[in-house]
Image: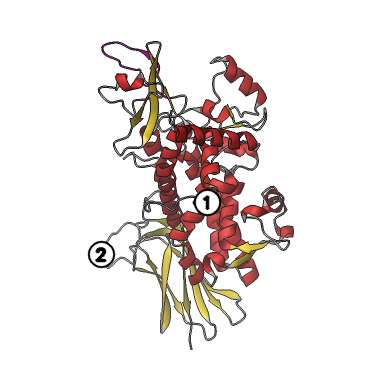
Amino acid sequence: MTRARLLRRLALALVLALVPATASAWEPQTTHAGLAEQAALVSRLHKRLVSLGFVGGLFEPLTIPPADAPALTTALKLLSPTHGSVPDGRGRQTALAWLTAGAALADIPASQGANHFFDPATGAGWIPPDRGLTDKVRDLLDRASVPDKGIAAPDWLTAKTNPFNLDQFLNQYAKAVSAATPGERSRYMAAALVAAGAMLHTLGDLGAPSRVRGDAAAHLEPLGGGPGDLGSRFERIAALTYGRLGVPPPSRTVSRNHLRDFFTSKDGGGLADVIARSYFSPNTLPEPARVSSEIRPRLVRPQPTLPARLNVMAANRDDGTTLRTASGVCLARYRVEHDVLTFAIDDDCILEQLSVILPDVAAYETGMLDFLLRGELTISVAGQITVTGSGGAGLGAGKVDVLVEDDRGVRTSIASIATSGAPPAPAGDAKAAGDARPAGEPIAQVATPATGTRVVAVFRGVDAAGEPIVAVGAMPLSH
């Protein structure tokens, strides 16, 4: 082992020993908040907020009065004010801070963290490790409060028991546009961002290999902060290395047509699919193997695969050698001792993986945030108000509300129109009702009001892919 590597390991071990908090996920107030923040900065969220009248965009102050949401206020008090996601005494903070607050709150209470696992090979969520595995595992299970079972992460997003589910986001988001007063709209938009942040957290957790490879035992490792400090060393190292502000930006923006596809998809492009086949976790490494003329260590999972020939000579060195991906990232260390080949993932290896995984997680989170905000409406005023779908998301069946805003910022509904999703059929055309209305097709036409400063519209229904959607738009009104 080189002196530099030894010093890095000793420093990291010392820091781990000084951090007492239980790590049940990517650490909520550091890694998760940082991931949500990076996603927001690249996504369409800032422009969307500005277009809807929240002129400061990501930095627009939004208020949820504590008396209006006592449970949320109580949960927020569990967060550290130093991390920038805790509102002031009035319940006021920026839009971006509300999003990161949601990312931090998704693990409160701690039992919610059991719903942030998903094994694409089996479809299962959190399943506790077998108590019969080892005395160490039995001891850890006795010391930890371990839930019996968790809801698989993709299902958790729509579960009725999830306080920050998709329906909650859509309800609050629609009200953030249609509510009468600026104060009400501020409150609803903040609540929508909290739900969105929690949903990003659920997706982002699947960037940890142990969460997508059925490796529950990796989340019961002693981390050095006392007998109750159990969690994932992989996730703790991410928090210590990057904090919140150091979380890297997304490597790209991942686009999908279905919400579940961000998690797992038939083409293997979901975050859980990619991470599960690309990385080992501590307890799904290749099994130890006796050194022979043909060494074929047994794989717990079909992927990642091993090269046809391992470098046994290098593996006999004290430090062993490294198994790497095609792009050069450490997958594991392997070494031979007493004629037995073993594999392990050390802290330096984890650091290499994190440098690749975190930008990819941010890319998926950015894409999902854009997906939640994908619904756009265009409003034109030429004799009458015409509302059309735009932004590439065709609209299916639903209802569109058209509102006019006065000079006090108060919005009043002037029309509520149900739509089948299909454009008006020409004579003799038996086009089926319920087909998606292409972007650019009018979905509502109403008379222009005599007074007002702005027209806004909200569509609530499904898109061309059958996914629930809220589409919104706004237009200044001049007379």
Q: Main secondary structure of the magenta part?
A: loop
Q: What span is colored magenta in the figure? A: 284-302
Direction from residue 200 to residue 408 in the image, left or right? right
The image position of residue 293, as x and y in percent, is: 26, 11
Q: Residues within 10 Å of mark 2 (few under 14, many from 20)?
A: few
Going 46% across and 55% down the picture, which residue do you hit?
369
Q: Mark 2 vs mark 1: which is more N-terminal?
A: 1
Q: Quarter holding the N terminus?
A: top left
Going 53% across and 64% down the picture, which residue do you hit?
58
Going 51% across and 41% down the picture, which residue do you hit?
238
The image position of residue 376, as x and y in percent, is: 42, 65
* Amino acid type of the residue that numbered disc 1 sits on in the rendered structure: Gly
Tell me the element at label 2.
loop
Which of the two residues, 102 or 176, is positioned nearer the viewer here?
102
Q: Residues within 10 Å of mark 1 (few under 14, many from 20)?
A: many
Q: Is residue 349 above or below residue 176?
A: above
Circle 1 residue: 34
* Amino acid type of the residue that numbered disc 2 sits on in the rendered structure: Gly
Tell me the element at label 1.
helix
The image position of residue 401, as x and y in percent, is: 50, 68
Circle 2 residue: 428
Q: Is residue 290 visible?
A: yes
Which of the two residues, 305 or 237, is positioned nearer the viewer here?
237
